[in-house]
Amino acid sequence: MALYKRAFDLGSKSRFTVASLFHSSTSTSTSTRHVSQAVDSNVKRAFLVDTLALVRNLETNGLPPKQAEAITWAITEVLNDSLENVAQSFVTKSDMQKSEMMQESNLSKFKSEVKTSQEHHFSLLQRETEKLRNDIDKMRTELRYEIDKVTAGQRLDLNLERRRIQDELATQNTETTNLTNKLDREIHALRAQLEAAKYDVIKYCIGTLVSISAVGLTVICIIL
């Protein structure tokens, strides 16, 4: 397992990668290097790897030539599959340009839709605002009319109440004047009666004194 892991590490650290075909040579000449080559059908590029050095390294670690070649072939297959997966995950420049053009077209369409929607909503908002303003003006007019109506009614009621109070005050003043005049007349009559009674009392007193004086003089004359 350590040898397989070391072989995989050596294959993953190589600078070049391979595609699906692998050719190795069993020649023992140290001056010849056998290179496997494969071409990616999508991107049309060749990937190279030094398989001979990998086989020699595996043989140096005690593996038979056939087993070393099989391990090298398996490693190159894995690397090739990885390259194919990576190549499939990328897109070409033309596809990228098409995608950018589609995105720009979608963005322009989205901007146009947003602008149209904004204009539509703005128009609706203006109409709603105008309707609301008209309703407010109408309510203001009705409220002013009601206020004027209530004010006029209250003013009329106040005028009527003031006139009623003025009439009551005038009536009370008249009654007070009549009562005062009546009291004055009664006071004058009572005063006249008192004066007459006083004169009568004085007259009776004088008559009584004169009578007493006459009786006294008569008695004195009789006695003398």
Image (cartoon, rainbow, N blue to C red):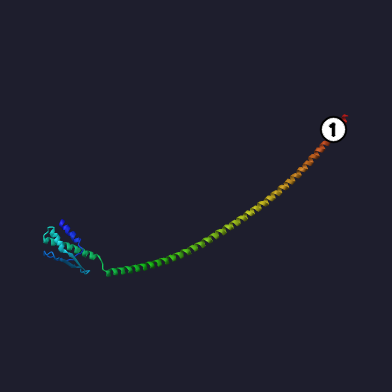
Packing grade of label 1 (10 A; few <14, some 14-19, many >=20) is few
The residue depicted at 36 percent of the width and 67 percent of the height is 111
Nearer-the-camera pick, 150 or 126: 126
Compared with 134, 185 (above or below) is above
The part of the image, by quadrant, that contains residue 148 is bottom right
User: Which quadrant of the figure contains the C terminus?
Assistant: top right
Q: Residue at x 56, y 58 (%)?
A: 151
Label 1 secondary element: helix
Is 163 in front, or is 16?
Answer: 16
Residue furthest to the front? 31
| For residue 6, above or below residue 221 | below
Left or right relative to 105: residue 76: left
Q: How many marks?
A: 1
Compare residues 197 and 15 and report the one nearer the observer.
Answer: 15
> Is residue 21 visible to us here?
no
Query: Which corner quadrant holds the N terminus?
Result: bottom left
Give above or below for 190 relative to 137: above
Identify the residue under disc 1.
216
Q: Which percent across, then down, holds residue 133?
A: 47, 64
Q: Is residue 184 visible?
A: yes
Q: Position of residue 115 (x, y in %)?
A: 38, 67
x%, y% of residue 206?
82, 38
The kind of residue on which mark 1 rests is Gly
